[in-house]
Image (cartoon, rainbow, N blue to C red):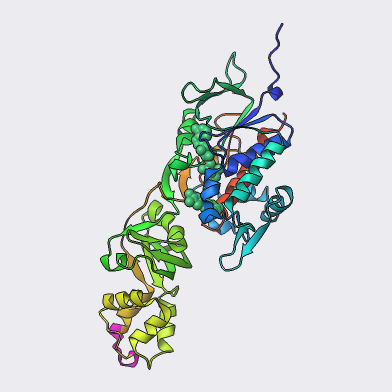
Amino acid sequence: MVSEPRALDRPVVVIGAGAAGLVAAASAAAQGRPTILLEGSAKIGTKILISGGGRCNVLPGEFDESAFFTQGSRNVLRRLFRTWPHAEIRRWFEDELGVALKLEEESGKLFPRSDKARTVRDALVEHCRSLGVQIETSWRVAGLRPPQEGQPAWLIEAEGEAHPPLQADRVILATGGQSVPKTGSDGHGYKMARDLGHTTLPVYPALVPLKHAEADLLALSGVTVPVHWSTWKDGKRLEQGVRSALLTHQGMSGPAILDASHSVVRDGAELRLGWGGHDREAWSALLRDTAARTLGSFVQEHLPRRLAQTLLARAQLHEDQVLAQFTREARDRLLSVLGDFPLPVTGNRGFAVAEVTGGGIPLAEVQPSTLESRKQPGLFLCGEILDCIGRIGGHNFLWAWVTGRLAGTQAARQD
Ligand SMILES: Cc1cc2nc3c(=O)[nH]c(=O)nc-3n(C[C@H](O)[C@H](O)[C@H](O)COP(=O)(O)OP(=O)(O)OC[C@H]3O[C@@H](n4cnc5c(N)ncnc54)[C@H](O)[C@@H]3O)c2cc1C
């Protein structure tokens, strides 16, 4: 008589070989469980390879909980981050994976010392292989069938006829969001989760360049400048920061704009800029200290020349004007343009270029201590598919590493 295979002999199957899936698979295999990692595209970890301009910003220099955004509970976030503290993740990369990291002082970001994203991707793949993870590429999952009467295992069905269904004891969904879909993360994971009873919060392109139609600024494409940015809704400031921005022929990009974008896109917030990295108050102080000079020399000391000229034209002022002779009204106009500039955003560049996807599976639909689904026992979720995004600076990978490890370890537990 052929006996049913014991549940423990059936593998933990991880769907999606991105940042979260690779760590989840390694973490499950490290518990001694047979583990299979399925990747829909032909290449593993494509997003890791294109991240950080090809250098992969592995982690932020320091952990900063305020750099993360979710519509779910901040307590849950805190609990999740406590499961794998920043210093231990760094040690894991350096000691276990052999990826030496360096801190880029000016940005506060950690990169591999090689400055090559491939170092990170290859080390993760090698680590999985050394732990016995079976990695299958071009294995795109179409759907999942949970265990039921007469069918004690999960059934994982491939798209098309390429592979027969796979049986699994536990399943980890690490299919990412839907930004840069050509990397393989096209949002199909949300549908699979919904088919299993999950809901999804509306998704939106986050960390995305913004569009505007201000002809004089569009003409300055290529100019980089620090900005003080703030987002506003109903007269209240939502967020602010100082980072560099890039003027483009379609609108604006760069770290400041990407950081600001999620509340502009999600909340329909207004974006205000303080050029040169100074808000209105800071410009006012600078102006007080330089009363004897001409406007042109003053503004150009703080801003690229072409931008300075454009902004002065906006304020209907001329570079030869002497600051000491300014009327109160002219001074006000100048401060508004320089330090409190409302950018009329007309749209964004969409999922094709967004670094991450906001929204997704609510944190309330997973157990915070295990990341097991509250809708389907035996299903675990990790990475960008969950409703959490971080600012640029390595925070999104931090989220992928932490949740991948927790899901992998817990899915492999033997109870
Ligand atoms: C251009 C760019 C630069 C970035 N730079 C950084 C950076 O420097 N630092 C940082 O912290 N963050 C960065 N990010 C964000 C970061 O890459 C993501 O947050 C992170 O990769 C998410 O990891 P994940 O494993 O959840 O999803 P993903 O990396 O998207 O992986 C999901 C995987 O699942 C696979 N998949 C999807 N559906 C299926 C299916 N049905 N069957 C099988 N496989 C499937 C996909 O092919 C993909 O390989 C960047 C993003 C972009 C787009």
Q: Which residues are magenta?
A: 323-330
Task: Residue 169 in the image: state x and y as whole percent.
Answer: 64, 25
Q: Is residue 389 visible?
A: no
Magenta stretch contains residue 328: yes
Q: Quick one: quadrant of the N terminus?
A: top right
Q: Quadrant of residue 170?
A: top right
Left or right: residue 336 versus residue 45 is left
Q: Quadrant of the C terminus?
A: top right
In the current view of this chain or complex, which residue is farthest to the top?
1
Residue 314 figure quarter: bottom left
Which residue is more in the foreground, 176 or 353? 353
Q: Position of residue 66 (x, y in %)?
A: 55, 58
Pick the front one: 187 or 387: 187
Question: How far across and how far down the image is residue 167, in percent?
Answer: 60, 22
Left or right, 74 with reference to 95: left
Above or below — where is 54 with respect to 407?
A: below
Is residue 20 on the magenta stretch? Answer: no
Identify the residue shown where x is 59% and y is 13%: 150
The prevailing secondary structure element of the residues shown in magenta is helix
